[in-house]
Image (cartoon, rainbow, N blue to C red):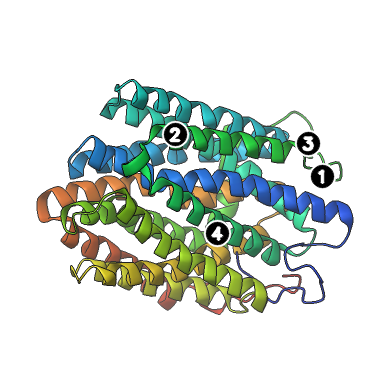
Amino acid sequence: MDNMSNNTSAGAADNTSDDSTSPAPGSRERVNFIWYLCGVGSWFSMFGMQVVLFPWLVLIALQESAARAGTAQMALLLPGLLFILLGGAVADRKDRRAITRLCHLLGGIPALLLAAAVMLDLLSFPLMLAYGFAVGTAQAFLFPARDGMLPYIARGNIQRAVTSATMVQFAVQLGGFALAGMAASIGAAPLLVVQALLLWFGALAFHRLDLSHLPAPVRSGPAPRNLAMIADTALIVWRHRTLRDVIILIGGMGFFLMGVIFVGVPLVIRDIYGGDSGDLALINMFNMGGMSLTAFVLLRKGGVARQGRAITCALGIGGLMLAAIGLGLPYPAPLLLMAGWGICGSITMSMGRTIVQEASPEAHRSRAMAFYMLGFMGTAPFGSFMIGQLAEYIGPLHAIAFSALGMTVIALWIALRSPIWRLEGSGNS
């Protein structure tokens, strides 16, 4: 989910291109973009599998409590809070391609170790915490470096490129969900090995990128310390009303909604509907189906003109849809509600990423993207922990309704007080 990561927006797209997925003409640009999409797809294929496997191992294989499920998700998401800003500072000063390659290579190791533990019957809750923290750390350094390369690959058509990457991200997660849904029948170990292989394929894809045209980081004098760079970017983001309000919205999504998706929904599947890994995969596939469909429509349509209004409405309505899961409706209803949230979530991520990409100064872009990811990844651990604790005392249905409605309140507050409501895309989108 990055993740729920893992996890576009801004004006009209270039409708003159003959290639619906290539952000710029020319053979090198097309090949570069294809390799970039392969790298993105490899990570999010793994992430799709993890979204199902991780809660299945904690809640069903280990039969842990709601509170422990929240703690496990917190371990997975906490590195985003601890390291995402450092990752952005490093990405602005170092070779972004090398960083992405290294994160993919190292990220496959925890999956192999966890597979060995499952085969040797050594699976335990502390081991799940260690796995979650290790993968989350790789993700925290990967995202700013990978997203920081995109404007140079997009070559002036950021919204179209981000929407294409988002569409691939959502589509490959569907495959990951489908694979992980077989955990109850074939076991988790072979699926964890597949996760590692996917990440290593991504390392190869990023290695094949031709970034000879990418400018070297500009330094006027000694390299600034990482903390000074982070503080400088924090000041820029805080003073930039658009960047600040987008990050507030994304932070609200991380705190109020990611815990619902990663902790609340798996608890409801287990405790209310009596489901297993197949049911976890199915509800996530409905979620991702809504996301993929919306990303495809955005790509074909050419973007959204009123991007600030789109992200605000999407989060407000999405909060209501997830809150409705807390009503305990008959089983098909949660699937449709998750698909509805998928539509809203796709708009949110597409709009949010593009607004930040276009509004941030070039020299601070990776760090600005790191602040964007911090808004999401930095609040999600606490939201997951909160949902786990609430579910322990008031039940998962009430916990979901309480948390999701909080997002609708935040979206309404932003809509009433922020100029983001009138924000429109730039001309090169």
Q: Is the residue marked by circle 1 packed among few (<14), some (14-19), or many (20+) residues within 10 Å?
A: few
> What residue is shown with label 2?
190
Depth check: give the residue in front, 382 or 269. Answer: 269
Q: Are marks 2 and 4 in contact (CB under 8 Å)?
A: no
How far across and how far down the image is residue 239, in percent?
56, 58
Q: Which mark is residue 214?
A: 1
Instruction: Provide the secondary structure element on which disc 2 rests.
Output: helix
> What residue is shown with label 4?
171
Q: Sequence-wise, which precedes: disc 1 or disc 2?
A: 2
Tag in front: 4 or 1: 4
**Picture layout, residue 356 above or below residue 40:** below
How far is disc 1 from disc 3 in space, using C-alphas? 15 Å
Tag in front: 3 or 4: 4
How far is disc 2 from disc 4 in space, using C-alphas? 22 Å
> What residue is shown with label 3?
219
Please name the amino acid that badge 1 sits on.
Leu
Please name the amino acid that badge 4 sits on.
Ala
Q: Is the residue marked by circle 4 packed among few (<14), some (14-19), or many (20+) residues within 10 Å?
A: many
Q: Are marks 3 and 4 in contact (CB under 8 Å)?
A: no
Depth check: give the residue in front, 194 or 23. Answer: 194
Q: Sequence-wise, which precedes: disc 1 or disc 3?
A: 1
Please name the amino acid that badge 3 sits on.
Arg
At 56% from the left and 35% from the top, the residue drawn is 86
**Would residue 256 be visible to someone looking at this image?**
yes
